[in-house]
Image (tube, rainbow, N blue to C red):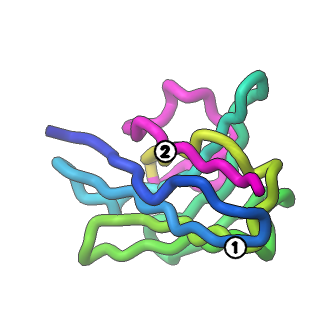
């Protein structure tokens, strides 16, 4: 079965950290550009970070630059999003998606149906 599964979400206090995982099954993740997205209630989906397949190029939204780090472990067929210095405005459902490696520069710009695979999402809540 081909799927992406996110994990690692939860409740954390402001200033805390979480590491999200995006694990693939049924296909090889290292071929794809992988993006992390988030959506808070009543807000549009926001592209948070992307990692390319060939040279490991990365992209970060201005809102998370310097706080979040995306990485991949091809041996584990998993992409991670390390989130530090979390703020209440980071609260959202975080999802990962797989995209053609040729479209890295468009990673956060494309409609949802342009991505090959989506995970189900994991809730991140930042609150004291």
Identify which residue is drawn at 43% across, 72% down: 72
Tell me where the magenta segment starts and ends, as one range.
101-128
Is residue 106 visible in the rendered image? The answer is no
Q: Nearer the viewer, residue 120 or 34?
A: 120
At x 60%, y 49%, the residue is 124
| SS under mark 2 | strand
Quarter-of-image position of residue 15 = bottom right
Location of mark 2 (residue)? 122
Q: Report the quarter where the N terminus lies.
A: top left
Q: Mark on residue 84?
A: 1
Q: What residue do we see at 57% from left, 67% from top?
A: 18
Image side of residue 57 versus residue 126, left or right = left
Q: Is residue 106 magenta?
A: yes
Is residue 110 shown in magenta?
yes
The mark that comes first in sequence, 1 or 2, is: 1
Q: Quadrant of residue 93?
A: top right
Q: For the image shown, how many numbered marks are present on the structure?
A: 2
Q: Nearer the viewer, residue 98 or 19?
A: 19
> Residue 87, relative to residue 65: is it above or below?
above
């Amino acid at each position: 079965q081909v799927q992406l599964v996110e994990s690692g979400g939860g409740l954390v206090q402001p200033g805390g950290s979480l590491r999200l995982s995006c694990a693939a099954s049924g296909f090889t993740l290292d071929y794809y550009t992988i993006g992390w997205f988030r959506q808070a209630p009543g807000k549009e989906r926001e592209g948070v970070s992307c990692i390319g397949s060939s040279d490991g190029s990365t992209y970060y939204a201005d809102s998370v630059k310097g706080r979040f780090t995306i990485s991949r472990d091809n041996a584990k067929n998993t992409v991670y999003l390390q989130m530090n210095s979390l703020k209440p405005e980071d609260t959202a459902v975080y999802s990962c998606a797989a995209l053609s490696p040729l479209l890295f520069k468009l990673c956060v710009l494309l409609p949802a149906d342009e991505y090959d695979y989506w995970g189900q999402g994991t809730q991140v809540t930042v609150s004291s």
